[in-house]
Image: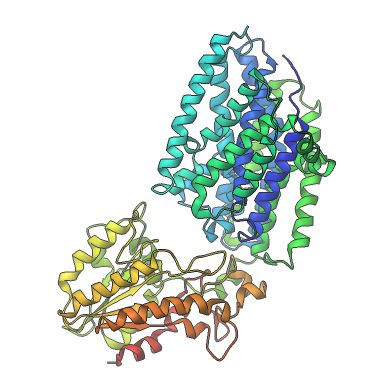
Amino acid sequence: MRYESSYRADIDGWRAIAVIAVIVHHFDKTWLPGGYLGVDVFFVISGFVITMSLLNRKADGFGSFLSDFYARRMRRLMPALVTCVVATSIAIWFADPASRQSLSTGIGALFGVSNILLANQDADYFSPSTELNAFTHTWSLGVEEQFYLVYPLLLWGFAKVGAKRDAASMRRFVIILSAMMAVSGVVFVATAKSYPVFNYYHLPARFWELAAGALTLLASQRQPFTRVGPLPLGAAALLGFTFFLPIEQRVAATLLAVAATTVLLATTPSSRALNAALTYPPMRFLGRISYPLYLWHWSVLAVSRFTIGVSIATLPFQLALMLALAWATYRFIEAPVRHGALFPTNRRILVASLCLLLASALVPITLRLHEQLGPFRSAAFDVVPASFLPVVGSGASFEDVCLLDGKKRVRKPDTVERCTAPPLTPGGNTIWAFGDSHIGHLQPMLYAVREQTGMGVHVIAMANTPFPSVVESVTSPEGQRTFAAVSPRFKPGDIVLLARFYLERGGPQRVQTDVPAWIPAAADLARQLESRGVRVVVVGPLPVFRYASVLSCARGMMAAACTPTRDSMMGVVNDVTTRLEAAAQGAPNMTLFEPFNLFCPPSATICTPFQEGQLAFRDQDHMNVFGSTRLVRPFMERLGLTPR
C-alpha cells in the first residue's frame, strides 16, 4: 500500500488550542465555561484528518485497506491509552476507597466503550460526581473509535477508495455522508433536553461533528479556499467566543464551535497571520503531545481530588506533572511504537495490539475485584458515615427502594408501602416527605423523629425533581402519582414536608432557575391542604461546598473548598429565604425550617461540613446519616414536636 503525507502543521496548532481549552475548563469551569467544546474541535479535526489520510491511500483491496487503517489507528491510539489506563488504575485504587466505578470505566476505555458505560451509569458529564471517575474523559475516545468502525466502510463502499475514483462515486459518497450528518445533527438538537446523557455520550448524536470535518476536507480538495480575506480571523474569534458561553447554551455553542472549526480547517493555510501563530514551535509541540496530554490531564486531576485537591495553589504542580507525563509518553512510548518497525506487518500489529489490550485490562480488572483491599478504604469509611439508614421494616437499601430516578429505579406496586413507616402510636400522625434527593438525605432525621415522637414517616425521593414539579422531567410524573396515591391518607395533624436543592453546583453561587416558580407552587399546595388540617413544612437551603470529594476534607486537604466563607453564600441563601418567608405569609399553615445556620453559624465566618469533629456531608450538598440526625432537635423545636 502506498500513501502520501497528510500532515498539516497548522492542525497541530488547533489541537493545542483545543486541549488547552479542555484543561482550563476542567481546572475550574468558571475560568472557561465552554472549554469542554475543545473535544468538539477534536471531533471535527479527526473527521478531517482521517478522511485526508484515507483518500491518500492506494490500497490493493478491501482487506488491505481495512487492515492498514486499523493497524495505523492501533499504533496511534493504543500505546498512550494503555500506559495511562494502567498507571491511573493503580493510582486511583490507592487514592479512592470506592474506585470500582473508575476501574470499570477504565476497562471500557481500553476497548472503546467507556462512553456507553458512562451513559448506562446515567453519568451527567457536567455533574460534580463525574469528576471523581478517573476515566470519564475517555468517553470521547469511545465515540471516535466507534466512528472508525463505520466510516472506512462507507468510504470504501461509496467513494471507491483504492480503485479509480470518479466524480459520480464521490458525489454519491458526499450525498450519503451529508444525509447521515443531517440526521445525526437533528438527533443532537432533539435529544439535548429530553435525553441529555444519550445526547452527550453516544455516537448517533456526535456523528455529525466528525462528518462535518470529513465534508470540509472533501470541499477544500474540490475547491481550495485561497481568497479568504478576514474569514479565518472571524472564525477564530467565533470559536474563542464559544469557549465563554455558559453551559445552558451548550447546543448553540456546539453548533457554532463546529461551524467555526470547519471554516478554520478549510481556510487557515491561506491566512498568513493565523497560520504563523498556529505553527509557532510551542503550539506545534503542544499539538503533537495533545493526545497523551488529554489522557493524563484528567488522571492528574482525578487523583488530586482525593489527595491534594485542585486549586490555584496546586495548579503549577499539576500542570507541570501533566506536561511531563504527556511528553514522556509521547517521546518514549507513542512515537517509537508509531514510527518504529517493531511489528513490520499489519497482521502482527493487530494481533500484538489485541494481546496487549487483554493483558493490560487485567490490571483494572484485578484491582476492581480487590477494591476492598485498597489501603485507604477502611479508614475512609470509618470517617465518612453511611448515606442512609436501612428502610424501616424490610431493612432494604433506601437508595434502591425509595430513591427513584424514573429509569433503573422506578416506583413499583409496593413502593409506597415499603417506604412508609407507620406511626408507633396507634392512630398517630404521619410526616409525609416529598422532594428530590434533598428530601432523601433527611431520611435519617425523619426516622429519628419517628423514634422520639411516635409519628409515622413516609419518604420517597425523586432524583433531580423537586415536588411540586414546575419543570417536566423523567421523574416528575412519578412524583405526582406518588402524591396522588398517598394524599387520601392525610388527616388533621399530619405534616407534609417539602425539601429540594435550591442552588447551582459549580461556578458562581446562584439560585436554580425554577426556584422562583416552585416557591409559589409550594405555597399553593399549603393552601389546598389547609382545610384538611395538614401542615406544610418547607426546608430551606443548605450550604453548597466546592470540594469534589468529601474525603479530601477528611484527609485535611483543600482547606478553602472545605471551609468557604459564610458571606460567599449568604446572598443566594437570603434570596431564597426571603422568597419563602413572603410565600408563607399567604399560607398560614406553611412553616419554614432553616438548617443553614447549623453548618454556617452566624457567630462564625466560615461554613464547614464537620460537626463535632465528624463529617456531616457525603458530597458537596447532601448530608450523611450523622449530619441528618444532627437536625433532629432543631427540627422538633421548630415544629413544636414533643417526645412521647
Q: Is residue 496 among the parts visible in the rendering?
A: yes
Name which residue lies at 58% across and 10% down.
Answer: 167
Quadrant position of the C terminus in the picture: bottom left
**Quarter of the N terminus within the rendering:** top right
- Farthest residue to the right: give it: 281
Asked if 258 appears above or below 414 in the picture, the reply is: above
Front one among 227 and 551: 227
Q: Residue at (56%, 25%) from the top-left corner? A: 151
Q: Position of residue 29 (x, y in %)?
A: 61, 59
Residue 256 placement, left or right of 431: right
**Residue drawn at (66%, 45%), measured in percent from left and top?**
237
Between residues 194 and 241, which one lies in front from this camera angle? 241
Picture coordinates of residue 541 (x, y %)? 44, 76
Left or right of 394 in this view: 119: right
Compared with 109, 265 (above or below) is: above
Image coordinates of residue 292 in percent, x first then y, are 72, 44
Q: Where is residue 72 drawn, in percent x and y?
A: 70, 27
Q: Is residue 88 above or below residue 146?
A: below
Q: Nearer the viewer, residue 369 or 55?
A: 55
* Colour approach in the figure: rainbow
Quadrant of residue 451 within the rendered picture: bottom left
The image shows a total of numbered marks equal to: 0
Q: Where is residue 258, by image quadrant?
A: top right
Residue that appears at 45% across and 51% down:
122
Q: From what the image shows, is residue 391 above or below residue 607? A: above
Q: Is residue 233 left or right of residue 204?
A: right
Can residue 112 be seen at all in this image of the molecule?
no
Q: Nearer the viewer, residue 604 or 521?
A: 521
